[in-house]
Structures are given as structure tokens and as C-alpha cells.
Image (cartoon, rainbow, N blue to C red):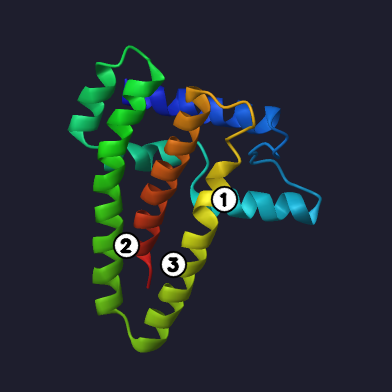
Amino acid sequence: MVREFGVFVAGLLLSMATLAGAAPVSTAPHHSSAAARRAALDAEMGNDLAHIELYDKFVSPQYRACLDKTDGATFPMRECMKADYERVERLLNAAYRQKLASLPPARRAALRASERAWQRRREPYCARYLSRGGGTAELLSFDTCMFDTTIHRTHFIRRFR
């Protein structure tokens, strides 16, 4: 169910972004510099369907079991995600500390700068899934984006050299 949920949420996020006037996420070549910047940010934040395999590696069995009990209701799904998001945040922080300790000073400075920039961009990036209309599906989309970008960032930090 988690894989199907991931595919569902990816489609939901794309639909909501399009309805809210955000540029849709696409792998097609872009011609404008704004679209190219959006595509680069999407890739950095992990907003693509290839991310689902990475997502599957990070979500906990408890999260999967919790989601299976929600019957697709958004409020319980958000509660499931909150617990696993906190776990994924701890993984990110541990990976960051470990990586900083293993890097030479110049690379350590580069990782710190990259991390600070990512932290400044993450929430505004995910806020694009919120519109003025509100609703629990929008909140779930925002939560999913925060969760997914954290997973993607943890993976990035683990591979950072």
C-alpha cells in the first residue's frame, strides 16, 4: 500500500501544483530559465517519480502498518506521517553529523553552506502545495513534500564527498 500511496501522492502533488498555478514537475526539456530553475529545484528536493524507490528504503515498517489502517482518511495519514517524519529528521541529523566529522575542512564548509541553503528553501518549496482554499488533502501534500525532501536530503548527504 505504501508504494501505491507514494504514486498517488506524486500524482496528487502534480495535480495540486498545476491547479495552484505552479509549474508542473516534468522531465521534458524546458525552454525558459524560470522553468529550468524550477526543474533544478524539483530535482534537488527529490520531487520525481524515481524518488519512490528511495522512499521505499526509508519508510519504516511502523509507518507502512499505520498507513494500512487509515482507509485513505487524510487526518490519520498525517498522524502516521508525523511519527515517521520525526524519525527521518533524526536520520538526516545523524547523517549530517557523521558526514561533517568525516570531511576535510573545505568540504565541511561546502556541506554546511549547502545544508543552510536547503533548510531555507525546503518549507517554501513545499508550501507551493498549499492554496488559499485549505483542506486536509493540501496539508497531507505539504507533509508529504516535507517528508520526501527530508528523505532525499538524507540520501544526498550520505553520498556527499
Residue carrying label 3? 115
Disc 1 and disc 2 in contact, CB within 8 angstroms: no
Q: Which percent across, then down, holds residue 142?
A: 49, 37
Q: Give the secondary structure at mark 2.
A: helix
Q: Is residue 25 left or right of residue 138?
A: right
x 44%, y 44%: residue: 146
Q: Which one is earlier in the sequence, the residue at label 3 or at label 2?
A: 3
Q: Nearer the viewer, mark 3 or mark 2?
A: 3
* Gap in angstroms between the C-alphas marked 1 and 2: 24 Å
Q: Quadrant of residue 22?
A: top right
Residue 117 or residue 5, whichever sits in front? 117
Q: Quadrant of residue 156?
A: bottom left
x 47%, y 27%: residue: 9
> Which of the numbered marks, if any, corresponds to residue 158?
2
- Location of the N terminus by quadrant is top left
Amino acid type indicated by mark 1? Pro
x 28%, y 43%: residue: 58
